[in-house]
Amino acid sequence: MAKERRKSNRTKEKEVNFQERVIQIRRVSKVVKGGKKLSFRAIVVVGNEKGQVGVGVGKASDVIGAVRKGVADGKKHLIEIPITKSNSISHPINGEGGGAKVMMRPAAPGTGVIAGGAVRTVLELAGVRNILAKQLGSNNPLNNARAAINALSSLRTFAEVAEERGIPIENLYA
């Protein structure tokens, strides 16, 4: 029993450093026999600004419940991304989510996060400080956030590429 107590304390400490931001709250309705049943959908981005980020969606009859469910869903769908020493990404990348496309490029230190809407929120909570990003196609916040997550999840480090090719990392720069 003492072990279980220690374990739960450890998980609570880990969860403290996660930040959450609500991207969108939308009132949705379902048509039932007695009329329309209203509920709320919340899109939430969860991240620790150290390379972990996730997007979650929650639905409930009240806003607070929807946000709480969205945070829980975001924590379930966390991804780990490699961030360079200059707080950027290692190479240009594209991502897709539904009808939305996102294009991302690394930027020099001091550039800042040049991105809009949901993509900006995802990048900030991931811990990326210098990046250029552009949303293409749909302007739906959920699809744009998912496209950003898709792009970030396909990032690779130089070490991973070198290992994949079976060559020393020094030969990549030549």
Image: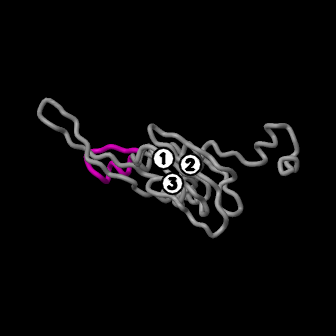
The CA span between labels 1 and 3 is 16 Å
Which residue carries the number 2 mark? 103
Q: Residue at x 41, y 49 (%)?
A: 141
User: Front-most of 71 and 131?
Assistant: 131
| Residue farthest to the left, as pictured | 34
**SS of the residue at dot 3?**
helix
Q: Nearer the viewer, mark 1 or mark 3?
A: 1
Which residue carries the number 3 mark? 122
What amino acid is found at the position of numbered circle 2 in the picture? Answer: Met
Q: Is residue 27 shown left or right of residue 166?
A: left
Q: Residue at x 77, y 48 (%)?
A: 158
Q: Is residue 10 above or below residue 59?
A: below
**SS of the residue at dot 2?**
strand
What amino acid is found at the position of numbered circle 1 in the picture? Answer: Leu
Is residue 62 part of the magenta span, yes or no?
yes
Which residues are drawn in magenta? 57-69
Is residue 28 part of the magenta span, yes or no?
no
Q: Residue at x 57, y 60 (%)?
A: 49
Q: Is residue 165 shown left or right of residue 24?
A: right
Give the class, few, some or many, for how many residues have Cα within 10 Å of label 2's Cα (few <14, many ≥20). Answer: some
